[in-house]
Every structure is written in structure tokens, then in C-alpha cells.
Image (cartoon, helix red, strand yellow):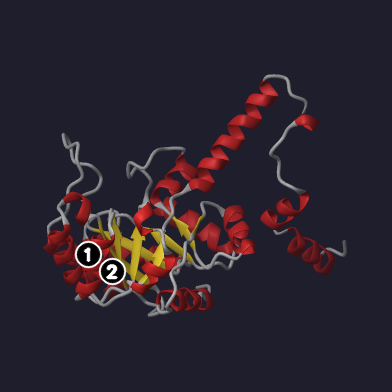
Amino acid sequence: MTDWSERRKAFRQVIEGQACVHPASVFDPMSARIAQSIGFEIGMLAGSTGSLTVLGAPDLIVLTLTEFADQALRINRAADIPLMVDADHGYGNALSVMRTVQELETAGVSGMSIEDTELPQPFGETKQRLLSIEEGVGKMKAAMAAKQDPKLVVAGRTSAIQIAGLEECLRRAKAYEACDVDILFFVGVKTRAELDALSAATTLPIMLGGATPELSDKDYLASRRVRIALQGHQPIMAGIEAVRATMQALRDGTAPKDLTGLPSAETVKVATRSADYDRWSADFLGQ
């Protein structure tokens, strides 16, 4: 198995540090290389961006574990940036969570989140539902038991605050912390009062998803032990629009030489790791 130790050490330095960082939303090898070249501390591969990249499908839990792990491995082979991934509900019950941890650990991820949302959406349901807290605890314990590398980070994720309210979120946060997960991941926190309550009731590092303008100050977030704050997945959305606009321009008769918004030659070299391949070609092919 490939040794992913250094990037996992770097990831742990982030969550064990004192600052709050925004991860780069990455979705393929080239986007990860670009993020690394810019200086992002962490890359984030979401279930939604994985589904878009691999299937061209919305985030409806139709992507399989194997497909997701394969995409994570492609990213990790191509770049050294520590990769955090959204492993959704672990693709099944607690035993499936164990398999998920094993596959993603082998794929080189530095961290993964396991959530307590009932996924995929049950027949006839239009609103998100939470698993019972007992099943959520079972999944967190299974995830921790399945780890082989102690440096691998497991995040206990819950959307309870937006589904069932603050008190239920606090109850689950304490329960998952007792399972010895490495970081708590809250989705749907909207106010400082909510974050203050969650921070006061727990001791682990915190990760936030879907933050609001009220929770945009990184110094404040850091003071509440928020070490990772997601900003969304704009890069892949920008890429979709860039492809559409370029194809539309060509279809409408724009000459290739007149297209706008194309990357510089230097950006392409970074994205394709051109310098490495030039060196290898000289060393091993005599070119």
C-alpha cells in the first residue's frame, strides 16, 4: 500500500492547530494540482462533486463507493495536497461504514466524514430524516474501529441542527465525541449563538459546512475551534459554465483563435504536471 503518511500528518496539523482554513473544492487530478500550486492547505472532494464528475448526475446518492474511492485515488496519485472527502452515510449500515473506511483509507484520503442522515431518501419522503442516535453512534464506532492508520481523520458529521434543532444537535455532538471521532462536522449552523453553544458543549476540533455571512470571520471561527470551514463547490460550477460557454461560442461560429477565458500555457503545465513528465522523458526515454 502506498504510504500516505506525510499528507495525513499535514492534515492533522491543520485540525490540531489554532487557525481556521477554507479547503479547496477539488474534483479531479487537475483541480487538485491547481489547488496545491495556489497554496491551499486541504482539498475537499464532496459527494456532490464526485457524482457530477464521475456520473454527470446530481447529488442523490447514486454514486457507488467504488466509483467514489476510485476518484479519490486518482486525485491522491496526482497531487500531494491532503484530501478530505465526504463519505456520506458510509454507503449503508455500520458494516458498510467499515468497508467505506477501508476503501477510502487505501485510496489515500487524509480525512473523511460519516454522517447520520438517512440516505438515500426513503420512498415517499420529501424531507431529510436523521438516523436514530443509536445507529449514528454505531456508525461512528464502526468507522473508528476500521481505521488502520491512526493518522487518518474521521469526522462525525450531523445535519441535526437544520433537521431537528439545536438541542438534538448538541445531544448528537456529545454522543459522537464520546465515540472518539477526530473532529465534529456540523452542517446547517447559521448563527454565532448556535456555534457558541456547540463549541461550549464539546472539546473536539470543528468543521463547518454551509456557513452563513454571520460565520465568515475566520478569527472568530478559530476562537470557537473551527479548523475547517467549507465555502461551497464553486470551482466545478465555474468549470461547467466555462465548457458550456466555449462550446456555445464555437457552435455560434467564433473562431478558436478568438475564444476568451482559456487558460494560460503556464496554468496548463501546472494542471498536467508537465515539468515532471518532461524530466521523466529526459531521464528514461532519452528525449
Q: In this view, does 119 lie above or below 133?
A: above
Q: Is residue 283 above or below residue 167?
A: below
| Numbered label attached to residue 150 | none
Looking at the picture, how far across and down is residue 196, in whole percent? 25, 67
Residue 153: which quarter of the image? bottom left
- Residue at point 48% right, 61% down? 23
Looking at the picture, how far across and down is residue 94, in whole percent? 22, 62
| Numbered label attached to residue 139 | 1
- In the rendered image, the quadrant that contains the C terminus is bottom right
Residue 81: which quarter of the image? bottom right
- Residue at point 58% right, 31% down? 244
70 lies left or right of 61: right
Residue 211 visible, this angle = no
Q: Is residue 112 above or below residue 47?
A: below
Element marked by disc 1: helix
125 lies left or right of 184: left
**Residue that lies at the very extreme toward the top in this rendered image:** 252
Residue 185 visible, this angle = yes
Residue corresponding to mark 2: 143
Asked whether 193 or 92 is in front, the reply is 193
210 lies left or right of 77: left
